[in-house]
Image (cartoon, helix red, strand yellow):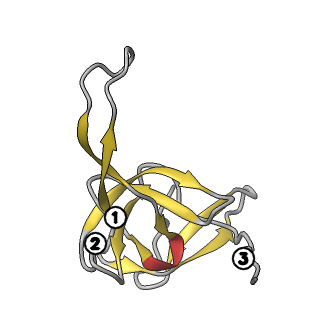
Amino acid sequence: MGYKKVQEPVKVKLKKNDLIEVTTGKEKGKTGKVLKVFREKNQVLVEKLNLIKRHTRPSPTSGQGGIVEKEAPLYVCKVKLICPKCATATRFRMTQTGEGKKVRVCLKCKELIDG
């Protein structure tokens, strides 16, 4: 019987409300807004992307049962941040400003992403 390999957590540099583009998989080329970041799992939840169907039973809290569509998390390695200045999916780098604050910088247009 084999063992499950545990994925090492990487430093996720994406934040809530970031605009991202999916680079691989069935959702390739689609864009969306990050709803939640799961740092320990290296995953992000993106608005209206990677939808799955869940069958739910009726309960006093939820009321009627049925088939519910909801978002499933995507791995961080499958998405790229969209730069608000140049409007393209780019890689970015963390740098420090003169005041010592850490900011993200687009590698294409060299502009600050979060200023």
CB under 8 Å between discs 1 and 2: yes
The residue under label 3 is 4
Answer above or below: position of 22 versus 61.
Answer: below
Compared across the picture, whether 46 is left or right of 87 comes to right
Find the residue positioned furthest to the front. 1
- x and y percent of residue 111 in the render? 45, 72
Check disc 1 and give the amino acid type.
Pro
Comparing 115 with 27, the one in front is 27
Please name the amino acid that badge 2 sits on.
Ala
Residue under label 1, please give it.
84
- Name the residue that disc number 2 marks: 87
Q: CA distance from mark 3 to mark 2?
A: 39 Å
User: In the image, what residue occupies the spot 31% across and 25% down?
Assistant: 58
Task: Say which element carries label 3.
Answer: loop
Among the 4 quarters of the image, the one containing residue 82: bottom left
Cα–Cα gap, marks 1 and 2: 5 Å
Report the amino acid beneath label 3.
Lys
Callout in the foreground (1, 3): 3
Quadrant for residue 51, please give it. bottom left
Mark 1 vs 3, N-terminal side: 3
